Amino acid sequence: MSGIAAVQYLRMLRDVSKNLDCDSSEAIDFIKYVSKQARHREDMVQIEACKLACESSLMSNKELLDVIKILEVFLLSQSTVKKYSVLKIFNNLLKNPFRKSLIINVKEI
């Protein structure tokens, strides 16, 4: 699957995930798929998967720690666009009181 197709598929999953129950097998598969895509070889797919993971209420804070570590790597990149995208994701996490502790408890970003 190409990078653009993977990004579009993740965007479609964002809408589908809103109707999933937290304990269903589909939600578990969703979490596994998004976590796998967060380690994709293309940067745009990684960022979109991390964004979806952070926006999803199905992911626990423990599961999001790996996603945050992936996003931290993008803050060190030379690309301004990637840094801006990651900062937008972190800003949305800071707006959520349950997710805010993930950012605050990280030693260095």
Image (tube, rainbow, N blue to C red):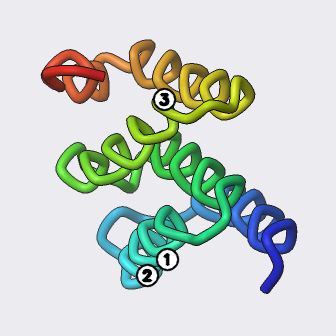
Distance from disc 3 to disc 2, alpha carbons, whole Å, reads 29 Å
What secondary structure is marked by label 3?
helix
What secondary structure is marked by label 2?
helix
Q: Where is residue 107 drawn, in percent x and y? A: 13, 21
User: Is 57 above or below relative to 31?
Assistant: above
Task: Tell me, yes or no, whether the two marked residues, 1 and 2, touch with CB atoms within 8 Å.
Answer: yes
Task: Indicate which disc residue 33 carries.
Answer: 1
Question: What residue is drawn where x is 46% and y is 31%?
Answer: 76
Amino acid type, callout 2: Asp
Question: What residue is drawn where x is 42% and y is 67%?
Answer: 35
Q: Where is residue 95 drawn, in percent x and y? A: 44, 13
Identify the mark nearer the N-term, 1 or 3: 1
43 displayed left or right of 93? right
Question: What residue is drawn where x is 75% and y is 57%?
Answer: 11
Pointer 2 residue: 29
Question: What residue is drawn where x is 49% and y is 76%?
Answer: 33
Amino acid type, callout 1: Tyr
Rendering quarter of residue 21: bottom left
Observer-nearest of 62 and 109:
109
Amino acid type, callout 3: Leu
Pointer 3 residue: 75
User: Is 34 above or below relative to 88?
Assistant: below
